[in-house]
Image (spheres, rainbow, N blue to C red):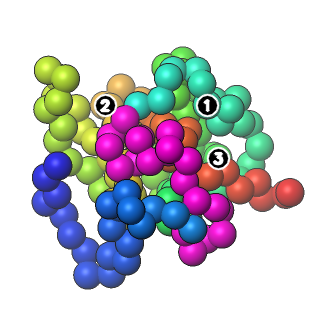
Amino acid sequence: MEENVMTANETRPIDGATVDGPACGCGPLTPEQIRVMRDHGTERPGSSPLNHEKRAGLYRCAACGTPLFRSETKYDSGSGWPSYYDVLPGAVESHTDASYGMVRTEVHCASCKGHLGHVFPDGPRPTGLRYCINGLALDFVPDTP
Ligand SMILES: [Zn+2]
């Protein structure tokens, strides 16, 4: 995979052998999470319990704990994956993904480079964007436990 954006404060590259016990305390990644976040896999549509998550709260990177999305920007896109129309500032990076015969924009965590999903230009106002994210790549933290 080709990375064209690197940051000076990169802390934890995903290389499979070291993707366990993230500092956030959210626990080691499961094999399914590693398949998505390291190998750019895609979870089965409709399989994530986060599709139905309606509570106010924060969605963090499952690998490193970095805050990525807020519940206020989550909406039901009908795609079968958790969808957001905006992202927390600087939380994700993207690059063009031409795999599977489609040109899409892949998004990954800016901190650990873990793959999250894709962003499409068919979202609602005000951004017009649809961040289509694998629930396995997210760790939801409700505002009120
Ligand atoms: Zn991360």
13 and 140: which is toward the camera: 13
Counting residues from the start of the chain, the first of labels 1 and 3 encountered is 1
Specify start and end residues of the magenta stretch as a single range: 22-41
| Label 1: element kind | loop
Where does residue 9 sit, x and y in percent of width and height? 33, 81
What's the amino acid at mark 1?
A: Ser
Q: From the viewer's perspective, is residue 141 above or below residue 32? A: below
Label 2 is placed on what type of residue?
Pro
Mark 1 or mark 2: which is in front?
Answer: 1
CA separation, marks 3 and 2?
A: 20 Å
Q: Is residue 5 magenta?
A: no
Quadrant of the rendered image containing residue 21: bottom right
CB atoms at circles 1 and 3 under 8 Å apart?
Answer: no
Q: CA distance from mark 1 to mark 2?
A: 23 Å
Q: In the rendered image, which residue does mark 3 sit on?
A: 71
Q: Which mark is residue 121?
A: 2
As drawn, the label of residue 48 is 1
Residue 36 forms part of the magenta stretch:
yes
The location of residue 142, given as percent across then percent down, is 76, 54
Q: Is the residue marked by circle 2 packed among few (<14), some (14-19), or many (20+) residues within 10 Å? A: few
At 78% across and 58% down in the image, what residue appears?
143
- SS for tag 3? helix
**Does the numbered disc 3 mark a residue whose Cβ is under 8 Å from ligand 1?**
no
Amino acid found under the numbered disc labelled 3: Ser
Q: CA distance from mark 1 to mark 3?
A: 16 Å
* Quadrant that contains the C terminus: bottom right
Q: Residue furthest front?
A: 17
Query: Can you tell which mark lies on residue 95?
Result: none
Q: Residues within 10 Å of mark 1 (few under 14, many from 20)?
A: some
